[in-house]
Image (tube, coloured by chain):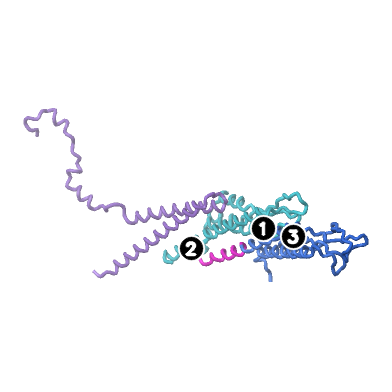
Chain colours: A purple, B blue, C cyan
Amino acid sequence: MMEGGIKPMDWRFQPIEPISELSPQAPQQKQTEADGPSFVEMLRGQLDQVIDLQNDAERLQQELAAGRIDDINQVILAVQKADLALTFTLELRNKVIEAYQEISRMQI
Amino acid sequence: MSDELFDGLNIAASGLTAHRQWMDLIAGNIANANTTRTPEGGPFRRQLAVFMEMTDDSGRSRGVKVQQQIEDDSELRKVYEPQHPDADAEGYVSYPNVNVVAEMVDLIAASRAYEANATTLEALKSNFMRALQTLQA
Amino acid sequence: MVDVLGRDVTLAALAASQSALDRRLELLAQNIANVNTPGYKRRDVDFTAELAAALDAPADSRGERVSNLGQVVAREIVEEQLFLRPDLGGVDLDREMAELAKTQLRLAATNQLLYKKIRQYRSVIKEGRI
């Protein structure tokens, strides 16, 4: 029902509101999603990185064996990076498992 | 007991032995540079070491050895000294065909080679030890 | 699967390299022992060509590549060059000592990498607890 005084032209330029904003269901859907990526996804991403670094290190070591490296430092650096990434990830995993075990021991 | 595990070390050791023998010869030459009378009669003659590669029955190299010691048969140095007890009928004394300067040059070469073989022996030894260390990984 | 290292191409490459370098040390020792041997011709190994070929060649599996690397035999050479004087052989002592030093350094690098690799395996097997 049109209000008095509004010219016929005006309502044609009023934007149509998106239905989801007005719907009373919308806020509840957002609350059930987790904040940010899950822990599993994060760990998986980390493992991908470890694998990439390991592949780099492997490739350079093979090149060294084949006599195709002219700078030993790039090999050493790659090996150290891969090693640290692996050690870090293993340690992270251990700490998570420890924390989980501690929590599951807590009496409620 | 087979020593093949230490082939490299044996080869370097043979280099040490051979070059030490050569140095002994050179020392003898220098010491006897003016010996006009030897127990065998006649003046001392320069001694030479003949080096030869050592191989075993299957043709594998075992390093080096002094195969034989020979006399340098080049001309003796004749000096006119009629008063000398070893002078010949014309008054000439035959001195050894030893040139001390040449002997010193040889001594330097022999000593360099000796040191090089010693370095090699050490290198082979430390390589073997280092390889063993991976067992501790 | 118990042969944990049997599918590790890098380890196989490093091991093949080490074999060839060990052999090179022995040949250099022969050269140095015979520095004053008349008529002696120096020896050497080309320790990278066969290894590089085995790495580059197509292989169906890692196991196959490891096997290829295990069969690499470095090519040994005899250099015909002799010096002009008849009482000399073909050995330049300075060159041999330089090659000895280089070979030792390569061996040290190869050895350290092998050590690190085996350590890593051990550490992973023990789940990060050394």
Q: Would you name the residue on which mark 2 appears?
A: C119
Residue closest to the far left: A4
Say if the magenta span includes residue B128: yes
Q: Secondary structure at mark 2?
A: helix
The residue at which mark 3 appears reads as B53
Tag in front: 1 or 2: 1
Tell me which chain the residue with mark 3 is part of: B
Q: What amino acid is found at the position of numbered circle 1 in the picture? A: Leu
How far apart are labels 1 and 2 at the CA level?
31 Å
Seen at 18% across and 38% down, the residue is: A17
Residue type (three-letter) at the residue carrying disc 2:
Arg
Nearer to us: label 3 or label 2: 3
Q: Is residue B1 magenta?
A: no
* Residue hosting label 1: C27
Q: Main secondary structure of the magenta part?
A: helix
Q: Residue furthest right?
A: B89
What type is the residue that disc 3 sits on? Glu
How far across and down, in percent of the image, does residue B24 sit? 74, 65
Which span is picked out in magenta?
A: B123-137
Crowdedness of circle 3 by 10 Å Cα count: few (<14), some, many (20+)? many
- Callout 1: SS: helix
Residue A91, picture quadrant:
bottom left
Q: Are marks 3 and 2 in contact (CB under 8 Å)?
A: no
Residue C34 placed where, x, y %? Answer: 71, 58
- Chain bearing mark 1: C
Q: Earlier in the sequence, mark 1 or mark 2?
A: 1
